[in-house]
Image (cartoon, grey):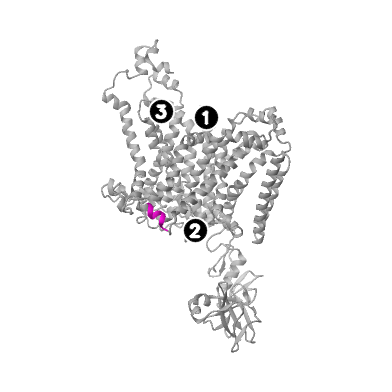
Amino acid sequence: MTITAPQPTRRSRRSSNMQEAAPSGLVLVVKILLMAMVDGFGLFLLMAFIANAQIIVAVTVGVGLIAVNIVYFRRGGLAAKYIIPGLIFLVVFQIFVIAYTIYVSFTNFGFGHNIDKSSAVEQILSNSIDRVPGSDSYPVAVLTADGQLFLLATAPDGSAKLGSADSSLAPAPDAVFVGGKAQSVAGYTTLTLAELFQQQEAVTSLAVPLGDSVSDGFLKTADARNAYIYESTFIYSVPDDTMTDTATGAIYRDNGEGNFESADGLILQPGWKAMVGVENYATAMASTGQSEIFGVFVWTFVFAFMSMLLSFVAGTFFALVFNDPRLRGRRGYRVVMILPYAFPVFLSGLVWSGLLNQQYGFINQVLLGGADVPWLQDAMLARVTVILVSVWFGAPYFFLVCTGALQAIPDDIQQAARLDGASPWQLFRHIKLPLLLVSVSPLLIAAFAFSFNDFGTIFMLSGGGPSNPTSPIGAGATDILITVVYKLAFLPGQKDYGLASAFAVVIFIVVSAISLALFRKTKSLEEVY
Amino acid sequence: MANISVPSLTIGATPATLAAVTPRPPRRRTPWEWFATTGWRHLVGVAVCVVSVFPLLYVISTSLSANGTLTGSNQLFASITFENYVNLVTDPGRPFVRWWLNTLFVAGTTAVLSVFLCALAAYAFSRLRFSGRRAGLATIVISQMFPQFLGIVAIYLLLSTLGDAVPALGLNSLVGLIVVYLGGALGVNTFLMYGYFNTIPRELDEAAKIDGAGHARIFFTIILPLVGPILVVVGMLIYIATAGDFIIASVVLSDTQIQTAPVGLYGMISLFRNDNWGVFCAGAVLTALPVMILFLFTQKYIVTGLFAGSGK
């Protein structure tokens, strides 16, 4: 593809220098006001990210903010001043997003692996606490403040201590004792028996840390009267990077894939985010013999190609039929015919899924007189159905495009062919079709790329079904790559961001390769023309 | 060309070639001849129109039917009541009015801001000469090939990170969704605008420059008014695309109260397709109507726009 642009004349070059003269008063005021707003907002973001300890994001915002200020306050670089507002969004939400997708595709990020290693260690330790045998009992009262539960414990030495799930146990000197047991503290409400009963579960699951580290242990109560010291049954050794189960003596080591794993293959949950190399790609490319995944690839190509081809054929046919000046009411036909293309895709998918419903749908019940055709339930038939429905809203587009392209074919060529005795078919085959292809082939590529990622049709119409219970990635018979990405990442039960991203990267590669190859082909077609 | 097709003007032609050029003499056609030339086209036309329009009529009929189930909507226009519409807007469990207004807000804001960002960039590419200009244009054309939703996983993770510190830019925020959509602003339509900007004579800016106007004044007071039509068209295209987006909106907005119409309507029938069918169809009519009206206004430009953007 070539991009043609008016060549700059010497005069226009000189005049663009003139444009950079100092701005007048009012413009300057507006500019400074706008920049003040941008900087104010940028600083707000910066503060928010720093406050939340998101240092990488904060640094990015800071660098971006400085860059924006340089662009707008330096003299010259006029083009950047116009491009940068859109460019910022493009960089963050298009280019960065692609890069981040590639990064995630090399990790095990997902359900059970969405925190860093130190948080995972902490969670494993605090999830497996057990009462320390023979430890002292602490008489407790359960208090509440701001909707949070606190334990007021009377230590064996007789002093009162207060703590909650978030704040470790600390001395409470102003506690009021009743019969040698700390009972209440000013500013907190002591729960009554009835309230305790109501919040039974929250009270019994409350674990108040004794110190800053998980290994210091917790205070827990089972009956809201006496609490005991609980400690994790696991011990994490920092120098060895191992977890030891004190109950069984089993040692769990970092298996390099974001989990602690014992010698017999037992895995501790949760795991953490870790780089897993090309594992996701190996799964995606079916190197492990999961032929369903390969099937998704093939089907995506078949769907995209058939949908494009049939839409084009149907659109061209209608364009030829209605491109006859003797035909009355052409405008009326035209408006009605493009309605499917105007109807939002997500709605037409859902509406067709209702029409094609096996038990109650209009097609089976009324048109076929109570037939029981499994339009979307049988794997092969469902594939045919989704292609046909995608043609239903793809054909009007090609009808519009081809009508325009046919009208642009010069009349004299057609007349010359007719004079030479060409039949209508010959006229179409040797004159109209080649010329049509020259102007429409870029759109065919675009249509292929669109269908390749036609999430709306597949997801709304068949939901990717009929489902295949043996598929390791939960892909049904009509699932294309992009619906697999969505299902893997966002449907309950899966949440495998790493594998989903690997599929997305594969789509990136396929779409780039196809568009590149086909655009080259188009260029050669144009040269022939 | 016209003189060839009119028989009386083709003086030098032999009778044989005359017949080849105009197979029908200008007399009244017999019914059979009429059918062979134009009649069958009407047959095809009627068939195509039935297939095209039937699902849409079915939606309207179902939305007006008294029985709101899939089973009960097979008799087209058997009854006409507005019960489904009333149910649709009064059920607090699925705030359709909120969804509809959310869609309007998100798609409208995205369209206006995208058009502005796009026009700024198109002005630079059309009127200014700078290094990296051709590469920039090529990048924009290439980025058209990659729909934003391919990075949906990364978008989700990015928003959940941003939202930890700034909830307005995070998940379950309409502003967050708009910001994501703005990421696609330059990609899709800048090239279309760029082509249109090039058709505005440069002599106009030259004259303004000589009169002492700066670049900002030229852009806002001379160029923008002249490119008004393309701004409107691009705005409508972005509105249509945004208002119909399901995939990004469904990932960003999980809270029922804050969803857009596509996400809400899908959630309404994804589990109980049969029961809510009539109410869903009422929602579909109300959701599709504004978009379809916009579409019929812009369809001419959609075709020519795609030609300009991808072909030349």
Q: Are marks 1 and 2 on the same chain?
A: no
Secondary structure of the residue carrying numbered label 3: helix
Residue bearing mark 1: A526
Q: Taking B36 as reference, is B129 left or right?
A: right
- Identify which amino acid the numbered label 1 is placed on: Glu
Residue A328 tag number: none
| Predominant secondary structure, magenta span | helix
Residue bearing mark 3: A429
- Identify which amino acid the numbered label 2 is placed on: Asp
Question: Would you call the spot at circle 1 few (<14 residues within 10 Å), some (14-19), or many (20 or more)?
Answer: some
Q: Are marks 1 and 3 on the same chain?
A: yes
Secondary structure of the residue carrying numbered label 2: loop
In percent of width and height, residue B202 lies at 63, 29
Q: CA distance from mark 1 to mark 2?
A: 50 Å
Front in this rendered view, residue B293 or A30: A30
In magenta segment, residue B5: no
Find the magenta span and give its range: B85-91
